[in-house]
Image (spheres, grey):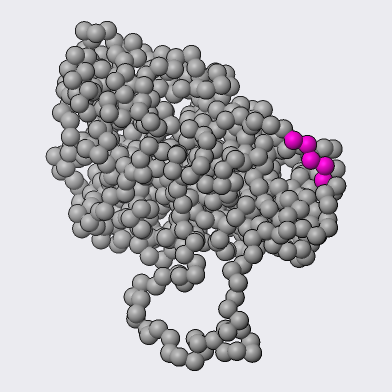
Amino acid sequence: MGEDGKAPGRREVMRLGLAATGAVALGTQPAAADPRNLPPNVPPWSKGLGVGVGSAPYGRPSPHEDHVVRRTVSWLTATPHSSVSFTPLQALHGTVTPNGLVFERHHAGYPLIVPEDHRLMIHGLVERPLILTMAELARFPSVSRLHFIECTSNTGMEWRGAQMNAVQFTHGMLSCCEWTGVRLATLLAECGVRPQAKWLLLEGADAAGMTRSLPIGKALDDTIIAWAMNGERLRPENGYPVRAVVPGWEANLWVKWLRRIELGDQPWHSREETSKYTDLMPDGKARQFTFVMEAKSVITDPCPENPLSEHGFRMIGGIAWSGNGKIARVDVSVDGGRNWRPAELEQPILDRCLTRFRMPWRWTGEEAVLMSRAVDETGYVQPSIAELRRVRGLNSVYHNNAIQAWHVSPAGKVDNVQLG
Amino acid sequence: MSSLARAAAIVVALATVTPSASAERLGIGRVPSPAEIAGWDIDARPDGHGLPRGQGTVAQGLKLYDSLCASCHGDFGEAVGRNPELAGGIGSLTGPDPRRTIGSYWPYAATLFDYLRRAMPFGDAQSLEIDELYALTAYTLFLNDLLPTDGRLDQDSIHRLKMPNADGFVSPDPRPEFPPKAPCMTNCTSEIRIHSRARTSDGAGGQAR
């Protein structure tokens, strides 16, 4: 997706600081409160009994938060069975994505697998092939790691120009979870890897039989075969009962509903690593096996969904991440990238995990362009969209980690723009 | 481990993976039977690994394609709606609207066989016989002028067939493209120019096709 965005239709020049600062019609106002519940009155929930324990054996968010949901883009795909839903980054806090809001990407719908009837098989260039029940898999020594997961196509609709006026759609193919499972290296030790083995094929049990080739170095380094996310078993749409977790690398490799791992001496060149998830360059050649998700950040407040409703103090906040390690710093600009200030980073800063940043701001109604720029521990600086386009052109679809710009109007409206 | 050290470790591991047979086994699970492995081992590689014996013709593929595939992919592989386009697009990869079809983009015919076997027809995967899969592969290649009307395909001819874009892919990954630098903090640009503005807040009214 994303390859279809049209070239921007117009160019505009904005001169910051010239905008009127007089009385303005401000943006969205919160729903009006019922004065009968406000002091000096006492609301009914302070008088009568509440809901008893056990009434919701599996708890749900407050009904007043029912707008915080995954959303889809209707025109993006031919069918909901091969499609994507987006995480509502604009409404999340901290760094962990609630399980019900983790983005989805399926190629043939998500299967409803009976765990007793599922097996994980490992074969190929091993001393001893292995087949495991899910109960047997869970007997292996486990690890738990916090890592972001990002679709290779995240922000892919923005290559040719600003398109989606919502952070949920520009950046929402991104989530972050605590993953629990067994290191793939532990499973491979159980099988005994033959010296000729250089690549692994990971295959899903869905009706797409999704397959990707994984270099054995990554498999032995930090890849996890996971059965849990955020403390509970995987959700069906996120791979139940077992999936791959490939830290810092594109989410397409994190094969869900994992049923089979084959070891071989070369990559398989499956459909998903040739006709898709390859990056077309201006010379007509395509980069293949571009695994790492490079450093990136985005301001989630303000953003198009979170406009400015009143003058005064506002904490600019957002998230940063890198597939190459820890976030070292994030700089924030409110004047379209002319000047930058270092943001404060929320602790702990974890390897290949979302990191929160924030910077205090006092808005007095002036026009502004908000941007964030991440730097990771390798010294890599998040590029501008212009820098990316100079190298990769307009048609590479994947791996768009450009700096995001949000334009703030004097009325407090926030819009997705690209600077050129 | 720092990420640079990790990257180095991955490279080393790629070069010198040693058998871990000496590691202590936990003794969990069992060895699958050859029949169990064969039932699930459906992958086929461009070098011929995994390609089952079988054959099919363009003519046989035409009948299958018309009844199973054309409703989504079109009579000539031109695609219906947003379903994938299968044919055409040769020469478009350097243009403003590249079309990544089997003929213009896919580097290997064996990948097509592998994908058809595991994922197609959409919603009825793994339902076709091996010979039917060769026939469908042959017909899809015919739609791209890569096989003649009387063409046929089997486990040997499939990887002798060189696809037009076979040399169109490069690896390893050349990134990072931008070397580490001290980011600019003050007076970094003289003029702020808005290049484009988003046109849609959600998918409902979007103009992009």
Instruction: Give the x, y percent position of residue B28.
Output: 25, 56
Write the residue at 21% across / 18% down: B62
Write the residue at 57% across / 89% down: A42
Q: With A114 as the anchor, is A24 left or right in this view?
A: right
Write the residue at 77% across / 65% down: A312
Q: Which residue is at the far bottom?
A: A47
Q: With A247 as the anchor, is A195 left or right in this view?
A: left
Instruction: Give the x, y percent position of residue A336.
Output: 76, 45
Q: With A84 as the anchor, is B67 left or right in this view?
A: left
| Snapshot quadrant of residue B83 | top left
> Visible in this render: residue A272?
yes
Question: Magenta residues: mostly which secondary structure?
Answer: loop
In this rendered view, identify the residue nearer to me: A190 or A222: A222
Q: Relative to A387, say whether B102 is above or below.
A: above
Instruction: Give the x, y percent position of residue A30.
Output: 61, 67
- Number of numbered tags placed on the structure image: 0
Write the residue at 69% across / 62% down: A309
- Is A245 covered by the magenta stretch? no
Q: With A121 as the anchor, is A251 left or right in this view?
A: right
> Visible in this render: residue B46?
no
Instruction: Give the x, y percent position of residue B84.
Output: 38, 29
Which residues make up the magenta segment?
Answer: A12-16
